[in-house]
Amino acid sequence: MFRFLLKRLLLTLPTFFALMFVTFIMIRLVPGDPIEVRRGERGISPERLEELRREMGLDQPVWKQFGDYVWGILHGDFGTSIISKTPILHEFATLFPATLELTISAMIFAVVLGIPAGVIAASRRGGVYDQSLMGLALTGYSMPIFWWGLILILVMSNTLGLTPVSGRVDLIKFYYEPVTGFMLIDSLLSGQKGAFWDAVHHLILPTIVLGTVPLAVIARMTRSSMLEVLEEDYVRTARAKGLSTYRIIGVHALRNALIPVVTVIGLQTGGLLAGAVLTETIFSWPGVGKWLVESIGRRDYPALQGGILLISAMVIFVNLIVDLLYGLINPRIRHAK
């Protein structure tokens, strides 16, 4: 197991370097730069603009800029935001708890509904439940996030008035200093009556929107894996022994069927971390995704480069955890070989 872990960690090094290179080049292919964005501001002379260009290192050759960027990363320096003058690591650490809270909530929503839906569909193959659940899963997978988010806002917020439209908490009613960055935990620690449920209400719509696609994927993968396992000889033997359907599915079939499902859950979790941009933008969720979108408009190179690299590190870490979980789910798997 240790050799497997070490091998995977070593394989991440070329991945990180390639990611740094692609991100660095692609950002600079976008028309305009931070200086051009600031040119529209009043009171900035051409001399000051040239001085800013030198301070940002934009007057250097591209290869020199990339070398300085890599050297900084190797020393734990992800740069400083051009706009806020704040270190990228500090900004990321401040905003990431909001993204992580939304991602965890969406994944819990997807797993809690997706796995039972897949199991029920597989156990009643070809029936009404199977066709209905898989039809809903296909519909959920096909819906664009921006469209689904706007529909829920129109119905749940504007028409029915059941949920808030944006933000993480009602700042007019509740205000408290962040302790952990997770609004659900901080609302409990604040001791203010109603703060926790207000945070929950703000989390409902973004969770549903972000969790719909992984829910559909998990449900379909669970069904497919369960159908394959239910045809195995040991399941037939369990049936011949007269074991109940619940015991056959819950004890014998589901554990082995979860191996590919865990893979999908891990991949979807990484995808949620990297793909929360639209959801955070629609609901004005103050997380990393919204921060990156704003950085694009400002041509904030360090924020974009550092944010993308840090999110990618999280995705790689999640995939590594998924690989290590294989052995816990099924002892027959041995990564050390």
Image: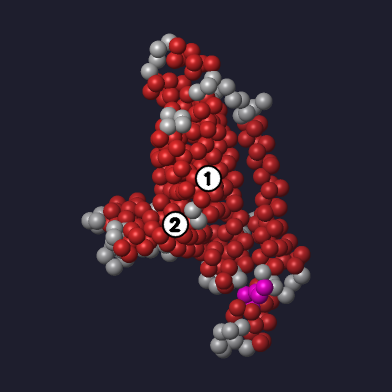
Q: x%, y% of residue 229? A: 52, 24
Q: x%, y% of residue 331? A: 54, 23
Q: Nearer the viewer, residue 232 or 281?
A: 232
Q: Given the image, on which type of amino acid does mark 2 rest?
A: Trp
SS assignment at label 2: helix
Query: In the drawing, what numbered circle is on residue 268?
Result: 1
65 relative to 34, above or below: above
- Residue 322 visible in the shown view: no
- Residue 113 visible in the shown view: yes
Q: Give the residue at x 41% y 48%.
A: 105
Q: Nearer the viewer, residue 23 or 262?
A: 262
Q: Indicate whether residue 32 is drawn in magenta.
A: yes
Label count reads 2
* Label 1 or label 2, whichever comes before in sequence order: 2
The residue that disc 2 covers is 148
SS assignment at label 1: helix
213 relative to 301, above or below: above
Q: Given the image, on which type of amino acid does mark 1 rest?
A: Gln
Query: In the drawing, what numbered circle is on residue 233?
Result: none
Which region shows up in magenta?
A: 31-35
Quadrant for the C terminus in the image: top right
